[in-house]
Image (spheres, helix red, strand yellow):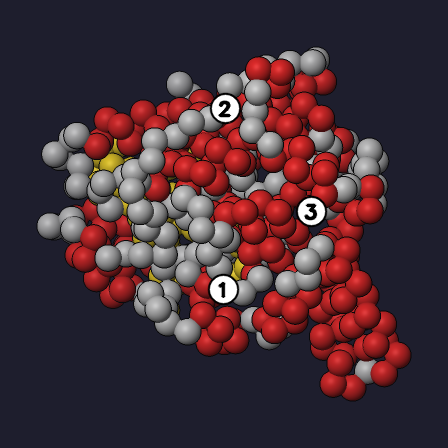
Amino acid sequence: MSEDIILRVEGRAGRITLNRPGALNALTHPMCMAIERALAEWRGDDAVSLVLIDGAGERAFCAGGDITAMHAAGLRGDWSYGQDFWRDEYRMNAALFHYPKPVVSFLHGFTMGGGVGVSVHAPFRVATERTVLAMPEAVIGLHPDVGASHLLGRLPGRTGEWMAATGARLTGAQAVALGLATHLVPSGRLADLAARVEAVSPSTRGAVDAELGAFAQATAPAAGADADARRRAAFPHWAAVDEAFGAATVEGTVATLERWAAAAEAGGGADAARGAWAAETLGQLAAGAPVSVKLGVASVRAARGASLAECLEREHRLSVRCVQGGEVYEGIRAALVDKDRQPRWAAPRLEDVSDADVAAFMRPLTEEDGVAPLELERRGADKYLSVS
């Protein structure tokens, strides 16, 4: 294949480098398949003790999946490209999550969408001061996929709903505070860190963790640490996130935000900061397709207590239906093709999307859908946010 991805062994590490810096290392279908093949090959290779994943250039680790080809195929009535891409991508996400050898990912620069799926499922996730982590799928008529519902559903409070609905961007420090990243390392030290990781021996999880810790400015709190305490240090509006996004419906969230924004505008004072945040958040919600905003919130809530396999299988159903009868083609057109940022949603208001509509997206696939359901192997307890 082309040099869109570079696979090699250096020292004791299998190295995976996403190599499309001009496209912010956007992930293509062949790249997903190449990653899965490399993981399978290195799994039984005694010369490879760990895996290190990074991206070429300084701007991005991976800003998401390359969905322009899917858009072009869809306009021709060919839905198979997106369906095949997602099936293989989600299988690769699961393989990464369950990999028996230590995996280290460098979340330098933009780490979004598909980039989250190929990095944050690793047990060791290194962020920097340049990291920008987000799941902004609602803007293009999709939903947080690549196992993101599993990740977001395990965040403290209602942080997951907030990120899914708004596409909110996290800094590297915030990603570490929430446990989405495990270590915060200055970007200028990544090359030295990579060299140390490649040589670490024995390449046990504990030895890798110790090596990363020697470079880290901060590390994620240990399992069992007070979730609210770590959020308070990183997010000035953490309590507002919980109250607004804890509403039973997205319409309830919007009503709360509108009340706060109006009160701040009228009175200022102590409510000014919360009101400004509420106004900004309302703008983020308005940028997404209403059906996608609702699907993202529902998917995160369904993920609580579910395994990664269950989450990926549900996300696959949502992705198939977003292609077959959702807003994704209009979203891609407005954001990435014509770039007019003026999507004409078929369901332009939240109230146009009913609970029954959301349930229809989530129901199991049948023969009538023309797509076989994704079925992933169950491999025991999920281990998210653990490096032990």
- Label 2, label 1: how far apart the Cα atoms are: 31 Å
Amino acid type at circle 3 is: Val
Q: Which mark is residue 6?
A: none
Quadrant of res 138: top right
In the picture of the structure, the residue carrying the numbered disc 3 is: 293
Relative height, residue 270 to residue 44 (above, below): below
- Badge 3 or badge 2: first in the primary sequence: 3
Quadrant of res 119: top left
Expressed as whole percent of the image width and height from the top left, the position of residue 275 reads 76, 73
Amino acid type at circle 2 is: Pro
Expressed as whole percent of the image width and height from the top left, the position of residue 37 reads 32, 25
- The local crowd at label 3, few if under 14, some if 14 to 19, many if 20 or more residues have their Cα within 10 Å, is many
In the picture of the structure, the residue carrying the numbered disc 2 is: 373
- The local crowd at label 1, few if under 14, some if 14 to 19, many if 20 or more residues have their Cα within 10 Å, is some
Expressed as whole percent of the image width and height from the top left, the position of residue 329 reads 71, 28
Query: What residue sits 41% from the left and 37% below the top?
Result: 309
- Badge 2 or badge 1: first in the primary sequence: 1
- Label 1, label 3: how far apart the Cα atoms are: 20 Å
